[in-house]
Image (cartoon, rainbow, N blue to C red):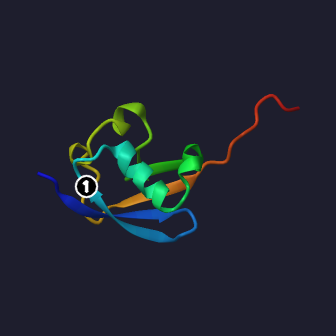
Amino acid sequence: MSTIIKVNFKMQSGKTYKEEVDTNKTIDRMIADFLEKRKLIHEMNKYSFMVNAAPLDKKEVLKKKVKHFKKIKPDCTIQVRQIDSIDGGSN
């Protein structure tokens, strides 16, 4: 049985998006759905997602279903940070 919860995605700019999330989806699918709605899916690697200081972009976390990750619950806030890429080897 599928359960839908509301989750807040708070951008670095301060803007917050309320999203309906199916708890049977994996965390990576939840993140992809959020980015697709904002037309940012092609820049997926430029964003970091955290809930209560727990990063959501670790390989072992991405595979979990939302309902199995206890920190994601109704009305929780997921922090969305833009990661600035650092060029290596430039002197």
Q: Position of residue 58 (x, y in %)?
A: 43, 36
Task: Determine whether the residue tagged by mark 1 lies in a helix, strand or loop.
Answer: strand
Name the residue rendered at 76%, 36% in the picture.
87
Q: Quadrant of residue 26?
A: top left
- Left or right: 2 with respect to 10? left
Q: Position of residue 31 (x, y in %)?
A: 42, 50
- Left or right: 13 with respect to 52? right
Name the residue rendered at 35%, 37% in the picture.
61
Name the residue rendered at 35%, 31% in the picture.
60
- Compared with 63, 67 (above or below) is below
Q: Which residue is mark 1?
A: 22
Q: Position of residue 27 (x, y in %)?
A: 34, 45
Amino acid type indicated by mark 1: Asp
- Left or right: 63 with respect to 15? left
Name the residue rendered at 39%, 43% in the picture.
28
Residue extending farthest right? 91
Q: Position of residue 85 (x, y in %)?
A: 68, 43
Circle 1 Cα neighbour tier, 10 Å, few/some/many (<14 / 14–19 / ≥20): some
Location of the C terminus by quadrant is top right
Q: Nearer the viewer, residue 63 or 58?
A: 63
Q: Quadrant of residue 68?
A: top left
Residue extending farthest top? 89
- Compared with 39, 83 (above or below) is above
